[in-house]
Structure formats: structure tokens, C-alpha cells
Image (cartoon, rainbow, N blue to C red):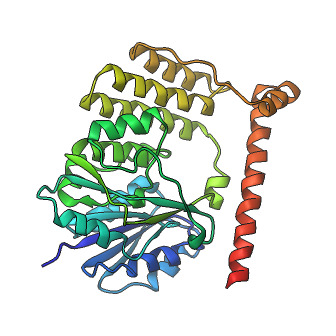
Amino acid sequence: MSDRVSILISAYNAEKWIKPAIESALRQTWADREVVVVDDGSTDRTLDIARTFETDSVKVVTQDNRGAAAARNRSLKLASGDFIQWLDADDLLAPDKIAGQMKAAAGERSKLVLYSSPHGLFYHRPHKARFVPNALWQDLSPADWLIIAMAKSLWMNPAGWLVSRMLTEKAGPWNERLSIDDDGEYFARVVAASEKVRFVRESRCYYRQASFQQLSRDMTERAGKSLVLSAKLRIQTLLSLENSERGRSAALAHLQARLPAFYPEKAEMLRHINAMASELGGNLTMPRFNWRLKLLQRLFGPEWGRRVMICFRRLRMGTAVKWDEWMAKLGR
């Protein structure tokens, strides 16, 4: 008998994307699979759309809005699979994504091997996705994977992973205190709990850039605290594997990359990450801003200059997203 794969989808106000996400799960060529959708208290038609897919192999449940991490923990409790495939409600899986990784798993004796894959970036048209290789797109030891990810500020789409049940249980649940970078902190623990990370080039998934929620996201107090906490926990995970000069250097690089999110107005959070840097034996440097931001800060002040720059970036990204949406409609 083949191993069952549970495809776990958490969704919040994703009525525009939930249908193609579930369809990509159901198109998997790996036959022994189930789909679990947890609606996290959506106020739009997400739940209604998801329920049109309900069968014996597609479970749909809802809960009060508690955040993505809580929804993912709920879906995991409902899963019966030997392997776990995470999928955000606005992302997609290639039809043979799971089959490719399961083929790789068949050649491994240990259930503690972790499988990753390439992810392509797209707006509305998956066939236009850009697959841009980086240093994580290779077989790596757990320590090497974490050090490279933190030193170079690299990331793996949650849909890119395939995780055995044994490894999932060893890593522990999603941290429900986190609202931002909960995936970064969670998969740092999964990587650390694994024996090795195997990159399966043939398996592909698709990360939808700049959904409305991403474009409208602000660095609220809660989000800022989440970012600081996730950085602290990820550093602890890394140093539990390798407390070396290169490990501490990667941790400092991770904090340095977080600095612009708080500079200059989030004084308390800046104090926290500077204190973490000091504990690592290093110091963070003031962010270097481009001439556009420097000009805006001179005109409007440090805080408002940064806000104006963020608005410009949102406008540019929003225009690109809307153009791609129009092209997708024209193609249909």
C-alpha cells in the first residue's frame, strides 16, 4: 500500500483563490491523498466555495478567526496522512508535485528526511511563473540550510515542502503567538528536526505574489512583535544545531535584514533586536537607504518619508498585479 498524503489548506477571506488552490490539490497524480481545508472565520464566500468540493476525501471545517498558525494546527489534527503537504489558499501545486517527492522518499530509508522543491513566482497566470534558483535549491544538511537561509535572507514557499508524519510530530505545532513569519519559524524547526534536506527539482509549486492582503499589510504593533519573536526563536533553533562563528554570523545577518522594518520609529523593537545582536557578540548598523527614500525623508521626515515610499511600492506592485489580471482575463 502507498503512503497517504494529507494536503492541508488554511484559508481566510480567500474567495478569489480558494477554488484553484483546491483544484490543484485534487489534480495531484499521487492517488492516495486527502484534502483538509480549515476556514479561519472568513467574512467572504471562502467557506461556501470550499464546501462545494466536500467529499469523503475532502474535509472542510470552519473556526472563529484565530490566525493562520491556529488554522494550520487544526488541519493537522484532522489529517490522517503519512506525509503532510502544506498549501496556502492562494498558492498552487503542479500536478506531479507530490508524486515527484514521494518517488524520492521511496529511495530513502529514514522518515526523517525532509523534501523541498522549486517554487515559481506569479500574479494571476501560473504559466508565466518565474522560477529563480537560489542557494537553498540543493541537497543540504539541516545546519547548512538554516545558515544559508538566514545569512542570505532566503525563503522557501511552505507549499514547496513535503514532510513525513514522524518529522512533523518531532518538530511540534505551529506557534500561534506569531502572526508574521510563522512559516519561517515553523520550518526552521522542521529543518532542524530532520536528518537532511533533499531538494527534488522535478517537483514544482507556485507562489502567488502580492495578493490584496500582502499589498495592504502594515507593520502593526502586533506584527512587529511577531517579527521580533520569530527572529529570536529562529536564532535559537539555528544555534541549537550549530553554535559556531558562522552560525552566529548568520544570526546577525538575519537581524540586520529585519532592521529596516522597524527603523526609525519602532524604538522598543529596535532595542530588542539590538540586544539580541549584542548577545551574539555583534552590532547592527544603521540601514542604508537609496536616494529616493533619503529625499522623501528630507521632505516629509523619517517616518512619513518611509510611509510614502511604501505607498509608491504598493502602487507599482498593484499596477503590475492588475495588469496581469487583465491579461489573464483576456487569455480566457
Residue 229 visible, this orientation: no
Query: In x, y percent, where is residue 33?
Result: 28, 77
Q: Where residue 149 appears, x then y in whole percent?
A: 42, 39
Work out whether residue 298 can be spotted. Answer: yes
Residue 60: percent from the left, percent from the top? 39, 76
Picture coordinates of residue 11, whole percent (x, y): 48, 66
Q: Nearer the viewer, residue 4 or 13?
A: 4
Left or right: residue 66 versus residue 236 is right
Q: Image height check: is 102 above or below 270?
A: below
In the rendered structure, the answer to whether residue 244 lies left or right of residue 69 reads left
Q: How many marks?
A: 0
Question: Splitting the image into 4 quarters, where does residue 82 fall?
Answer: bottom left
Above or below 167: residue 326: below
Q: Is residue 178 above or below residue 15?
A: above
**Residue under the point 88% across and 28% down:** 299
* Side of 72 relative to 30 (left or right): right
Q: Going 75% across and 34% down the picture, which residue do you hit?
A: 306
Image quadrant containing the N terminus: bottom left
Residue sitting at x 76%, y 53%? 316
Which of the image's four quarters has the C terminus? bottom right
Task: Tell me if residue 117 comes above or below residue 143 in the rendering.
Answer: below
Occupied quadrant, residue 239: top left
Report the residue at 25% width, 32% height from top.
241
